[in-house]
Amino acid sequence: AQLQGIIDNELLYGLSLEEDRQLLDGSGEDDELLGILQTDGTQTYDQTDSELKVEALRRAATKAIIANYPATGYVLHPYDWEDIELTRATDSGDGQFIVVSNVAIGAETQVWRQPVVETPAIAQGTFLTGAFGLGAQVYDRQQANVRVAEQHSDFFVRNAVAVLAEQRIALAVKRPESFVIGTFADASD
């Protein structure tokens, strides 16, 4: 039972990481989902050299709003979010942090009134914003599960076991124009 718990937890965690990757950047080939970042018709925004990363986030969200799909969140690589949170005001000379997260227990990480999701499933230097509820739909045909079998090939004789973790989902990006894929000018900003 203890081994089963370890296998279930680790496989399901790995499956969750792969799901994140495919929802964002899946190729759409060989049974992979076509991720939002690979979908034709999405908008783009490139940070200029004169603006901060936090400003680029806000301007990208405006592009979604102009397309009549108000942005409902941001997806950022952890290093990019760290850069944003650690950005200090330099023009006032007081060195205050520009973005101050609410440190209350259970507080949601936000910027520009929108939640932020940090994940290494998105490349550093790239971010995504958009109307996630209106723009795309995840269809969950089968929840994640783990199965064990020893009936494969000579597994029974060798006392071997095959362990399979699977989930069946589909992603429909119904309104690609509701998403804005952003690029930061420099990872050190």
Image: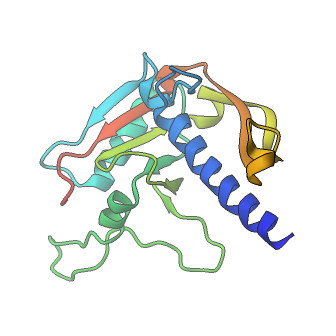
Q: Does the image show residue 161?
A: no
Q: On the rendered structure, is 23 left or right of 177?
A: right
**Quadrant of the drawing holding the N terminus:** bottom right
Q: Can residue 143 be spotted in the picture? A: yes
Residue 94 shown left or right of residue 103 in the figure: left
Between residues 173 and 14, which one lies in front from this camera angle? 14
Q: Viewed as shown, does residue 79 lie left or right of 26?
A: left
Provide residue 153's location: percent of width, then percent of height: 73, 35
Q: Residue at x 36, y 68 (%)?
A: 85
Compare residues 147 and 57 and report the one nearer the observer.
147
Residue at the image position 12 percent from the left and 47 percent from the top: 49
Q: In this view, does 12 lie above or below 19?
A: below
The quarter of the picture where the C terminus appears is bottom left
The number of numbered badges drawn on the structure is 0
Please tell me whether residue 22 is drawn above or below residue 157 in the rendered image.
Answer: above
Q: Residue 73 versus residue 138: which sits nearer the camera?
A: 138
The residue lying toward the viewer, choosing from 97 and 10, is 10
Hey, which quadrant is residue 122 in on the image? top left
* Residue drawn at x 27%, y 69% as measured from the top left: 87
Residue placed furthest toward the right: 1
Location of residue 2 by image quarter: bottom right
- Residue 110 in picture, x, y percent from top left: 51, 60
Residue at horizontal 56 percent and vertical 35 percent from the top = 23
- On the image, the x and y values in percent for residue 18 come to 56, 44
Residue at the farthest bottom position: 94
What is the residue that sits farthest to the front in this orientation?
157
Q: Is residue 126 left or right of residue 131?
A: left
The picture places residue 75, in percent across and down from the top left corner, at 47, 48
**Image colouring:** rainbow
